Image (tube, rainbow, N blue to C red):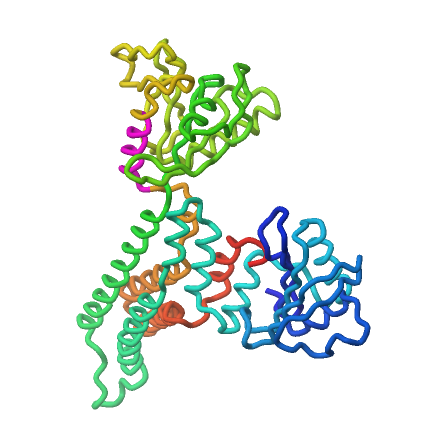
């Protein structure tokens, strides 16, 4: 990570607004921002904490500039924000102007780089960065609330206690290596060492299992409406949402991309409802891309509502399904008559009359409640702390497998380093990279 140059990015949400923010961070942040402003001699040479009013060197639009000198800033470095009218084109031009005026001293920020600099400077904990990452990835109100309440202090305290116990074990192993010629130094017995390591591994595995369960609990299940083209999926999608979100047409192939919307089903279940293009053999380049979107959505699905136009013979679900719970649905049952027996227990529905929609909602909620959500962005996010704990547990397993004391000690050192990182030390670059690569630019 290039930490020498000042980084610049739009930090406000996409789209137009009354006010937008361009954020900079770096040792010379103020100098680069000042170079992009009109200066009649009133701008200070050095950054002072506070807010001032200035004008952009182009096209003379007044802006508010907030100066936050480091280390008492969000990133631990000098931070300067330009608050301007929230026109996306204008904000991007401000970023370009700051970069151009810097003479190579500033560049556009990478995803997550502001948060990464905060962690590296000690201005934020890794748990704080994880909280930001989960908020970015949240797809429902439940996931956003889980991100707000994410707490890493307990994990850090537990890891610190384990690190102390492991340091004592390592000291005994190394004593047995370095002082074998001294009679008054007794190395730890192999049986005792294995017992202690086994207890430590069990504690770590318990925390890993708990973290995995927490991740599943905060992830919204994904419910995909799938079937052949023109099976009434989009109409059913709109009916379940209660508003027109997808284009409805009797023509085949109207849906050309996967549409996702957060919904609340009976019993307060939060889920992500997905409408996908109909499954059929792809012949054109556009068809191939459409089918790829459908296949990807089905791979990530927790529940698939398999839609077929009724009446007719029930078909088999797609082979693209990957362990999802299947709910068979008959669409376009506008006459309100129940589906005849022998059709796989399909639920009769009508998007036009509303027939069967309440029953379908309950069936989808029941199916989703039985699954361990796998497709949510928050679920895929994972945890840098969990990755470190897993690496520590693997190192402890390797230590037990080794017989040579030197190799045992080497693996114990690896485990101790990882536990130390969980307890608050800065993780290695690869762990940071995996975490911050999931961020958006400007955070």
Q: Quadrant of residue 240?
A: top left
Q: Position of residue 382 (x, y in %)?
A: 40, 53
The answer to whether any part of residue 165 appears in the image is: yes
Q: Quadrant of residue 23?
A: bottom right
The residue that appears at 36% across and 58% down in the rendered structure is: 149
Main SS category, magenta section: helix
The residue that appears at 56% across and 77% down in the rendered structure is: 71
Where does the C terminus fall, quadrant-wise? bottom right
Q: Inspect the magenta stretch and tell me whether residue 403 lies in it.
A: no
The answer to whether any part of residue 410 appears in the image is: no
Q: Position of residue 391 (x, y in %)?
A: 37, 61
Q: Position of residue 207 (x, y in %)?
A: 28, 60
Q: Is residue 259 above or below residue 152?
A: above
Q: How many marks?
A: 0
Instruction: In the displayed orientation, state which residue is furthest to the right.
Output: 40
Q: Is residue 419 above or below residue 229?
A: below
Q: Which residues are magenta?
A: 360-372
**In this view of the protein, which residue sits in the foreground, 27 or 234?**
234
**In this view of the protein, which residue sits in the foreground, 410 or 231?**
231
Q: On the rendered structure, is 18 left or right of 132?
A: right
Q: Position of residue 20 (x, y in %)?
A: 63, 55
Q: On the rendered structure, is 221 left or right of 80?
A: left
The residue that appears at 37% across and 59% down in the rendered structure is: 150
The residue that appears at 45% across and 27% down in the rendered structure is: 238
**In this view of the protein, which residue sits in the foreground, 439 or 400?**
439
Where does the N terminus fall, quadrant-wise? bottom right
């Amino acid at each position: 990570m290039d930490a020498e140059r000042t980084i610049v990015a739009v930090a406000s949400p996409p789209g137009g607004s009354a006010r937008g923010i361009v954020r900079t961070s770096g040792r010379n942040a103020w100098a680069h921002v000042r170079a992009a402003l009109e200066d009649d001699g009133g701008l200070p040479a050095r950054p002072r904490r506070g807010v001032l009013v200035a004008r952009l060197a182009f096209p003379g639009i007044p802006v508010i500039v907030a100066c936050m000198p480091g280390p008492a800033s969000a990133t631990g470095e000098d931070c300067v924000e330009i608050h301007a009218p929230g026109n996306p084109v204008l904000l991007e031009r401000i970023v370009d102007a700051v970069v151009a005026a810097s003479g190579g001293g500033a560049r556009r920020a990478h995803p997550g780089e502001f948060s990464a600099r905060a962690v590296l400077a000690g201005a934020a904990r890794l748990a704080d960065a994880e909280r930001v990452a989960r908020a970015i990835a949240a797809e429902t109100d439940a996931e956003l609330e889980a991100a707000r309440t994410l707490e890493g202090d307990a994990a850090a305290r537990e890891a610190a206690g384990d690190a102390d116990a492991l340091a004592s074990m390592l000291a005994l192993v190394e004593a047995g290596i370095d002082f074998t010629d001294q009679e008054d130094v007794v190395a730890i017995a192999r049986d005792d060492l294995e017992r202690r390591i086994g207890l430590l591994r069990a504690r770590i595995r318990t925390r890993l299992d708990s973290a995995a369960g927490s991740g599943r609990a905060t992830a919204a299940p994904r419910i995909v409406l799938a079937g052949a083209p023109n099976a009434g999926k989009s109409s059913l999608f709109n009916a379940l949402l209660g508003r027109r979100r997808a284009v409805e047409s009797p023509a085949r192939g109207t849906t050309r991309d996967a549409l996702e919307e957060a919904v609340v089903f009976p019993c307060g279940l939060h889920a992500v409802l997905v409408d996908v293009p109909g499954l059929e053999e792809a012949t054109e380049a556009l068809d191939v891309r459409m089918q790829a979107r459908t296949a990807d959505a089905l791979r990530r699905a927790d529940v698939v509502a398999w839609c077929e136009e009724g009446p007719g013979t029930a078909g088999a679900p797609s082979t693209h399904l990957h362990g999802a719970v299947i709910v068979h649905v008959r669409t376009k049952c506008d006459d309100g008559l129940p589906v005849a027996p022998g059709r796989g227990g399909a639920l009769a529905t009508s998007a036009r009359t509303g027939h069967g929609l309440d029953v379908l909602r309950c069936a989808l909620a029941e199916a989703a409640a039985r699954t361990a959500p796998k497709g949510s962005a928050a679920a895929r996010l994972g945890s840098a702390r969990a990755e470190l704990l897993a690496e520590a547990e693997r190192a402890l397993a390797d230590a037990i497998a080794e017989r040579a004391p030197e190799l045992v000690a080497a693996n114990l050192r690896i485990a101790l380093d990882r536990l130390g990182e969980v307890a608050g030390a800065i993780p290695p670059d690869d762990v940071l990279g995996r975490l911050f690569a999931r961020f958006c630019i400007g955070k």
